[in-house]
Amino acid sequence: MSESNRDRTSADVTFMRRALELAARGWGQVAPNPMVGAVIVRDGAVVGEGWHTRYGALHAEREALAVAGDAARGATMYVSLEPCNHTGKTPPCSEAIYAAGICRIVAAVADPNPVAQGGLDWLSARGVDVLVGIESERAMELNAPFFHALRCDRPFVQLKLAMSLDGALADHTRKQAWLTGAAARAEVHRLRASVDGVAVGIGTALADDPMLNVRGIDPAPRIQPARIVFDTSARLPVTSKLVRTAREYRTLVVCRAPEPARAAALEAAGVTLIRAASLADALRDLRTAEIRSVLVEGGSGIASAFVRDALADRLIIFRAPVILGSGALHAFGGAPAGTPDAAPRWRIVDSRRFGDDQMTVYARVEGELLSS
Ligand code: AOF
Ligand code: ZN
């Protein structure tokens, strides 16, 4: 089997980027399975494309093979994840690829799923030319929650904050007001559509009375994410929008040792309580409750706690072009004091502009090293 840079061409990168673009069409539709895209190329021309459209539907490779038909014979297949080698909801893609006569396969990343992996070795043993590692970073970032779930017992945590140029979440009056524009706020709904849970701290829940559901996204997510409130003493009012809609949208309150009457009132309204002694324990319990990915949306108390306990895998910062100055609420004011040489560093994995706002996605460098 060829490894990374050996034998790669610039066409390999171009077609793999296309496969990744196709994969992303499964956004919000395929979890807990991965988004996967496939492109079949013969004599430099695309003869088939496919992607995993919906949880339980055909895998990307089979979709592309169905489009290519006989043109797949002697062609190259680009796929954003190693083809599966198991019979799960569908028979092994490895066998379909071989039977169709694909003579070269280029995969972005090997499949870490022990149940499904092995397709590349299986094809290589049958004489198919195999290359793995093209655009692997992008491929892993696209399915970060999927890869994370296979190696960690807590959910993949993305901490999203909208802040001013000077790193504040609110001005000196603490009055609720939009910092970012409409395009950035729409992107937040797109992000919500890709996770199993959307979370806030009790401070934000009390101040904003949010719904925390996905709105205005087409196609709508296959499943609305659960709403999660980190609320040590279970103070969330039964009159809040979250509690009033708890029978419509799954709602969880993470608490410690709440007053029995409060707990009973929330439970009677359809809220699930998770009692945990620490944030780390709470995350393990959420994972047990099938929540593999969480978008934490603030405020500063919970953001600081996630940073303090090194439990945020990504920071998604939307920076609005405004300075709030004196008395403003510092996004991470509750995190322990750090110094430039000793505080953990973050690396940029994505950066995009939404109207006048800049979104930057950071990965925790220390965590990545520890968990890889
Ligand atoms: C997908 N879509 O396009 C590809 C996948 O449960 P199953 O039978 O659908 O198998 C899921 C596994 O198959 C998944 O974890 C991944 O390892 C592999 N490839 N999965 O859902 C796809 N190509
Ligand atoms: Zn498959």
Image (spheres, rainbow, N blue to C red):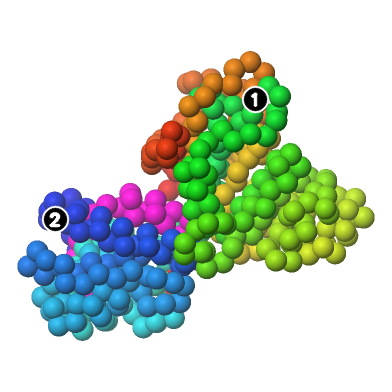
Residue 167 x %, y %: 55, 26
Q: Residue at x 66, y 45 (%)?
A: 200
Residue 150 x %, y %: 48, 60
Of residues 137 and 316, the one nearer the viewer is 316
Specify whether tag 2 is near ligand 1 (CB below 8 Å): no
Would you say 182 lies left or right of 229 here? left
Residue 211 x %, y %: 67, 53
Name, please, the residue furthest toward the right: 261
Mark 1 or mark 2: whose residue is earlier in sequence: 2
Of residues 218 and 80, the one nearer the viewer is 218
Q: Where is residue 24, by image quadrant? A: bottom left
How many numbered marks, from 0 up? 2
| Residue 180 forms part of the magenta stretch | no
Q: Judging from the image, what secondary structure is the residue with disc 2 in?
A: helix
Of residues 160 and 140, the one nearer the viewer is 160
Residue under label 2: 11
Residue under label 1: 171
Q: Judging from the image, what secondary structure is the residue with disc 1 in?
A: loop
Q: Amino acid at mark 2?
A: Ala
Q: Amino acid at mark 1?
A: Asp
